[in-house]
Image (cartoon, rainbow, N blue to C red):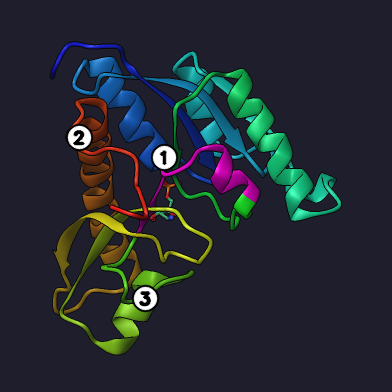
Amino acid sequence: MTEGPPLSLGVLVSGTGSNLQAILDAVTAGTLNARVKVVISNRAGVQALDRARAAGVTALTIPHKDFPSRESFDRALVSALREAEVDWIALAGFMRVLTPEFLRAFPGRIINIHPALLPAFPGVDAAQQALGYGVKITGCTVHFVDQGVDSGKIIAQRAVLVETGDDLATLAARIHGAEHELFVAVLRDIADGRVGPFCSEG
Ligand code: GRF
């Protein structure tokens, strides 16, 4: 790990938070030069919030249902993230599409993890889609976030073989394991300066 100021990270979640846990564990182990400054969930009571608190990280719930529009919800997110002084945003199972206003607040510095080899199988149920098609190789992708659904520029991918007899549970579990490694690896590349903010002209 290179020396330098730690990456200031905000993590947005909606559920279990196993990817968040992988990030927190890497920070604790000293293998990722980052600080998770805040974790924000749009759903109350999810496990990801407990994981954040257990690691001593500020955990906030900002329920999207409390806001009259996507824009006003996103403004609340931006304000909490700015208050926490984060530089990069990691979407770790965050189930909301972000508005252009949010994207402009953190230009080129928002990344998402998706459980398929994009551009195959965007959206929800990616592992189920992979099984349905009968693909023999699937995987996971970390990409920059743009206005689409799982459509931004790809940063890194990892392949996962679909094995004979796989069902949704076994395949999803194997993809999840790959996600945990890939997400941390990409964040390490960002923290150590090997990956910079996405620049659309570049
Ligand atoms: C992951 O499969 C991620 O790719 C997708 O949502 C899931 C979140 O899992 N966007 P977890 O909450 O990190 O366990």
**Mark 2 Cα-neighbour bin, 10 Å: few <14, some 14–19, many ≥20:** some
Location of mark 2 (residue)? 189
Location of mark 3 (residue)? 121
Q: Residue at x 15, y 63 (%)?
A: 159
Label 1 residue SS = loop
Location of mark 1 (residue)? 109
Can see residue 197? yes
Q: Residue 71's spot in the image, x, y percent?
A: 74, 50
**Between 148 and 164, the one nearer to me in the picture:** 148
**Mark 1 Cα-neighbour bin, 10 Å: few <14, some 14–19, many ≥20:** some
**In whole angstroms, how far apart are the C-alphas of marks 2 and 1?**
13 Å
Q: Residue at x 68, y 29 (%)?
A: 79
Q: Earlier in the sequence, mark 3 or mark 1?
A: 1
- Please name which of the two marks, 2 or 1, marks the residue nearer to the observer: 1
**In whole angstroms, how far apart are the C-alphas of marks 2 and 3?**
26 Å
**In whole angstroms, how far apart are the C-alphas of marks 3 and 1?**
24 Å
**Between 172 and 118, the one nearer to me in the picture:** 118
Can see residue 14? no
Q: Residue 106's spot in the image, x, y percent?
A: 51, 38
